[in-house]
Amino acid sequence: MTNALRPSEMFALKWQSFNYEKLTITLSETVYKGKIRPWGKTPKSMGVIHITQELAKALLFWKQQCPTPTPDTFIFSNSRENFIDADRFRKQVLHKLAAELKLPKLTFQVIRRSIATLAQTMGSVRDIQGILRHSSASTTADVYMQEISERVQMTLLSISNELRAIPSSSSLEPNGSCCQPIESSLEFEVAMNM
């Protein structure tokens, strides 16, 4: 969740986008209306983003699970080795997870707004704008960042801990992904940390 990728960005990622040594991912394509396109939602959407060492290790592990991790293979693919449909992922994975965690709603937009809200104590609006890759700082400040109490912050921390504790037998993507179904908390965390 730390990189706050939009689903259109995350599901278009191919292994050629990932650079383990530099700890980067290059956003050069997005998924839109069932097709890959060479542009993003905003001019700032595309480009190189930095990732944590932890996420890089998880991605490297994920790549090693792939039978054919060629540069053109999607990092997160369906059973036909095509990109994952964001609506289907939302319904089959995020809605199921929301129900398990007793959350009223869990979508990529909720995740991005949560990141912005939590990050406001750690950086400036411009910093958060950069993470979310918004064209306008006012979009970040006025739409994404919200005031949250310490109690809500503790609840969010509890949710994060619950996400990390999902048992390995839990099948969150029944039709498979890049290499195999998303079956463990590590694999789900790789997707959500994007």
Image (tube, rainbow, N blue to C red):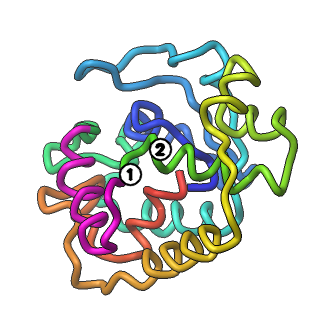
Report the residue at 26% width, 47% height from top.
Answer: 90
- The residue to which callout 2 is attached is 15
What amino acid type is highlighted by mark number 2? Trp
Secondary structure at badge 2 equals helix
Closer to us: 72 or 79: 79
Closer to us: 193 or 124: 124
Q: Is residue 77 left or right of residue 30?
A: left
Classify 31 as above or below 2: above
Give the image location of residue 148, x and y in percent.
66, 58
Q: Characterize the magenta stretch by its predominant secondary structure.
A: helix
Report the residue at 30% width, 53% height from top.
Answer: 178
Report the residue at 66% width, 24% height from top.
Answer: 139
User: Which quadrant of the figure contains the N terminus?
Assistant: bottom right
| First to last magenta residue range | 87-106
Closer to us: 34 or 101: 101
Q: Quadrant location of residue 53?
A: bottom right
Any mark on residue 69, and which?
Answer: 1
Q: Is residue 191 magenta?
A: no
Any mark on residue 45, and which?
Answer: none
Give the image location of residue 42, x and y in percent.
58, 15
